[in-house]
Image (tube, grey):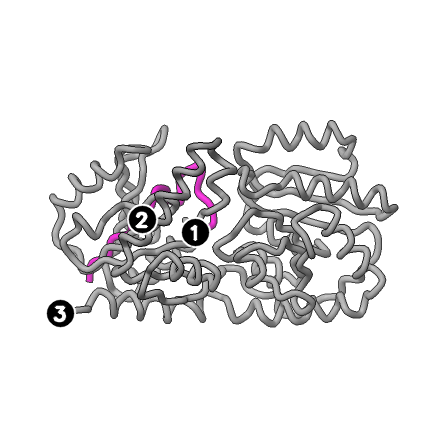
Amino acid sequence: MRFLMLNWRDPQNPLAGGAERVTQAYLEALVQRGHEAWWFANDFPGAAPTANLGGVHIVRGGGMGTSILHAVRWYRRQAPFDLVIDQHHGIPWYAPWWCRTRCVAYIHEVLGPIWSAFYPWPLSAIGRWQERWTHWGYRKVPFWTACQATRDCLRAHGVRDITLIPYGVHTRALPELEAKPLTPPLRLVTVCRLAPNKRVEHAVRLMKCLAAAGVTAQLTIVGGGEEEMRLRGLVAAESLQDRVTLTGQVSETEKNEILRRAHFLVHTSLREGWGLNVIEANAMGTPGLVYPVEGLVESTLHDQTGLVSAEETPESLAVRLQEILLQPDKYQSYRKAAWERAKTFHWDVVLPQACAWLEAQAQRGQ
């Protein structure tokens, strides 16, 4: 069968993130099952018009506001597809109205408040309004997501058919859970694209709170993005150069080693579709310390595989850390539970379920 994924970015786009990583895993798995997989994405400076990644055919055309027209023109010159996957990131591709074949919608999170992180009012309000009514327009299209909170929000917007399939990770859990005493310095890590909606400045301010409380701690920020220079300026302004390190982009091997050494992964995002880096950290024996927001409260189970703060503030995170520092045995129980749970989210477990669902959708009505 022939599958087409529509997504604004592909894995080689400088702005690619977790959404593109999981999309690539699904499509490569379909290829390994004997299918053809295509991916239409926006063009970007320096990009070739086509590429092949793991057997997935990538085609690029257009940019913000024009890529849908490029996709339609390209699509009409292709052999028929069995299934088109319309991936939503605030604005969809409107494929059900032009693809003339079976179509499903794939969504990581309903942006909601994230619109305000990127756009001022009234653009942010318009974005939220159109997102809600777009979902209502797609109400008869089968949706696929990984997050229970996203499913609930889609239902509230009128979507009728929603399938929940968990994300997977490539990271293999450590073969054995090695010793990691909860002793100073407290080692924290944040791994994400440095974008406004990730609120990495909250993790930096957490270090100020810990310093004021007399807790010796180190924070490593892994990733790149448009917020990097602002974060470096904040670190300097708060005189935290000896406590906070920004590494930029690193290899998967180096990232896993940083996660393995850390005591906690800190995640302060506005909202997540899940939180892949939480599970990657868990696989390395590192619990999560996260904000109480959609997605993150599913990837980190409070007081089981890590800690969820009471409020979305650095001060609340600091309280959680100070509490657990007095309970080293409980910290070790978090590590073990997180490590065991991470094994159930490896792609080897998740991909067969996802591919079977996509194949079934492609065969609907045949």
Neighbours of disc 3 within 10 Å: few (<14), some (14-19), many (20+): few
Of circles 2 and 1, the one toward us is 2
Label 2 is placed on what type of residue?
Thr
Which residue carries the number 2 mark?
134
Label 3 is placed on what type of residue?
Gln
Q: Residue at x 56, y 39 (%)?
A: 194
Of circles 2 and 3, the one toward us is 2
Which residue carries the number 3 mark?
366
The magenta segment: 1-18
Q: Which residue is drawn at 31% across and 37% down?
A: 42
Which residue carries the number 1 mark?
110
Q: Say which quadrant the C terminus sits in.
A: bottom left
Q: Which residue is drawn at 69% across and 67% down?
A: 303
Left or right for 325, reference 100? right
Neighbours of disc 1 within 10 Å: few (<14), some (14-19), many (20+): many
Answer with mark 2 or mark 3, whichever residue precedes in sequence: 2
Task: State the separation of the CA atoms marked 2 and 1.
Answer: 11 Å
Quadrant of the rendered image containing residue 159: bottom left
Element marked by disc 2: helix
Element marked by disc 3: loop
Q: Where is residue 234 in the image (x, y as percent from the top left)?
A: 69, 30
Near-viewer residue (350 or 133)? 133
Q: In this view, does 351 lie above or below 295?
A: below
